[in-house]
Amino acid sequence: MELFRNFYEGSIFFYGLAMLIMYALLALLSFRGVVRFKRKDRNTDYTCLLNSALAPGISVIAPAFNEGVTIISNVRSLLTLNYSRFEVIIVNDGSTDDTLEKLIHEFELREVAFAYNERIKTQPVKRLFKSTNVAYDKLLVIDKVNGKSKADASNAGINAAAYDYFLCTDVDCIIEKDTLLRLIKPFMEEEYNKIQQVGEPCPECGYVHIIEEGVRVIAAGATLRLANDCEIDQGVIVRVRPPRKLLPRFQEMEYIRAYVLGKMGWSMINCVPNVSGGLGLFDKEIAIKAGGYDHKSFAEDMDIVTRMCQYMIDNKMRYAVRYIPTTQCWTEGPPNMKVFSRQRTRWGRGMAEIITIHRKMIFNPRYKKMGLVVLPCSLLFEFLAPIIEFTGLLYYVYLIITNSINWDFAVILLAFVYLYSVMITTIAICWDQLTLRYYKTWREVMGLALMAFLEPIIYHPLIVFFALRGYWFFLTGKKSNWGNMQRQGFGRRTVQTA
C-alpha cells in the first residue's frame, strides 16, 4: 500500500508540475503573439485587399435548421460582409418550419440546374436555388435531407462551394464585417513568403531556380465571444459588456482564456489543436482530400483539423494552422444549466472520440508536432484531466478518513494551485484587453477577473462532471443527439453583422 501511495502521489506531482509549466509557456507565447499581431495589424492596409479583384475567393457556408424566425436578417447580414470575392451558401438541412419558404420569397429564389459535385458523401441534396435578382447574386441556397448534424450540412456546402477557401459558421452568429479580410491574411502571408523564396544559382545552367517549399496554411480561426447582455442595435454590436448572469459570465471568462491565451499560444508554435466550429476558414482542397467533416462525430471541428494535418504529413507537405486574437464572431452561450450540461457532455464525448479515433497518431514521431505535441497534450491535459481530478478528490477523501493527510502541506498545495489558476485566467483577460479593449471600463474588466476566484469552486467542478458524463456516454454507447440550443435571441436582429 505504501508503494502504491508513493507512486500515485509522485505521478500526480509531476503531472501537475507539467500542467503548470505548460500554462506558463502558453501565457508567454500568447503575449508574444498578441504583441506581434498588434504591430503587424497596425501597419496593414486592408483597403488594398478589399478593393482588389485578385483577392482569393471565399465561400461562406452556414447550415440552417428551423431558423425561420431570424433567417432573413441573418442571410442579409452575411451578404454585406466587407470583401471583394465571396459567396454565401445557406444549407437548409431539412427544416420543418418555414425557413426555406421565407428564403424563396424574400430573395426571389428559383430552382436551378446547378452542377453539384458530391465529393464528400452527404444526405441527398433535393434542390438548389439562385436568386433572379442580381442584388442577391452571391447567394446560393441548398435544400437537402436532414443529416442530423451540422457536419453533414457543412459538407454539402463544401461540395457546392465555388472558391478555394470556405468559411464555416453558424447562421445565428453575429460576424464582424471585416472577418474575411482578417482571416484570409494568414493564408496570403504564407503564400507571399513561399513565392519569395529562391535558391542559389544552379551550377549547371547558371540560373536561380524558384523554390516553392513554403508553409501552406490549411486553416485559420479567431476569438469567439458571448453576445449575452451586449448592446445590439439592428444586429450590430454597439457596446460590449460581460454577461450579467453567473453561468454565461463564467463561459465568457473561459472563452477568453481558451482562445486568447490557449489557442493564440499554440498558434505561435504551430500546434493549434482545433479551429472552432462557430468560425473557421479552411483550405477547401485539403479539407476535401481529408474527407470533410465527420457527420458522426461529436467533435467535428477538432476532427477535421486533425485529419487535414494528418493528410499534409502523410503527403510530406508543410502546413500551418493560424489563430488571430481579435474577436470576429459573437455567439449566445447556453442560457441555463440544462442546455449547458447537454453541450459540455457532448464536448466530453467528442474528446473521447478524438482520442480513440486518432490513437495511432499519439506519441508517433512520424506525425511530428501533431503526434508528439498536439494530440499528447489533448490526451494528458484535456482528456485525462477530469479523470485525474476526480480520482484525486477520492484520494483526498481516503486520506482524510484514514487520518493520513499532512494538513500543513495539503493547505499550502491547494492554495498554490488555486492562486495559480486565478493568475492564469487574469493574465488571459489582460491579454484580451491588450488587443482591442473590448470592455470600456475597468470596472467591467475587474468584475470579470473576479470570477476567476469563484471558478475553481463553482464552475470548474461542473466542467469536470459533465466531461466525465460524456466519457461515460461514449463508453456505454448511450445514444445522444445534438439537441437544441434554445437560443434566447439577440433582441432586434434585423441585421446580423457587426
Image (spheres, grey):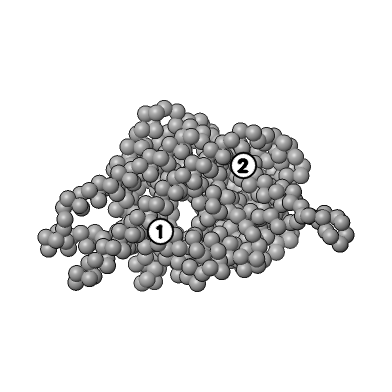
Picture coordinates of residue 386, whole percent (x, y): 33, 59
Give the residue drawn at x 45%, y 28%.
440
2 or 1: mark nearer the eye: 1
Real-space Cα separation, disc 2 to disc 1, in angstroms: 29 Å
Mark 2 and mark 1 in contact? Answer it, CB < 8 Å: no
User: Quick one: SS at disc 1?
Assistant: helix
x%, y% of residue 124? 61, 66
The residue sitting at the right extreme is 205
x, y percent for residue 204: 86, 62
Task: Identify the secondary structure beneath mark 2.
Answer: helix
Residue 319 image label = none
Horizontally, residue 413 falls left or right of residue 493, namely left
Tell me what residue is drawn at x 58 percent, y 65 percent: 310
Q: Name the residue carrying label 1.
A: 382
Rendered residue at 84%/60% (across/down): 203
Q: Residues within 10 Å of mark 2 (few under 14, many from 20)?
A: some
The answer to whether residue 250 of the structure is visible from this angle is yes
> Where 111 falls versus 3 (above or below)?
above
- Going by the picture, which residue comes out furthest to the front? 203
Which image quadrant: the C terminus?
Answer: top right
For this rendering, which residue is in front, 231 or 383? Answer: 383
Left or right relative to 319: residue 65: left
Asked if residue 453 is positioned above or below residue 5 in the image, the reply reads above
Q: Nearer the viewer, residue 1 or 392?
A: 1
> What percent of the width, then of the height, locates residue 496?
55, 39
Q: Which residue is mark 2?
A: 182
The amino acid pointed to by label 1 is: Glu
Instruction: Say whether residue 133 is visible.
Output: no
Q: Earlier in the sequence, mark 2 or mark 1?
A: 2
In which quadrant of the rendered image does the N terminus lie?
bottom left
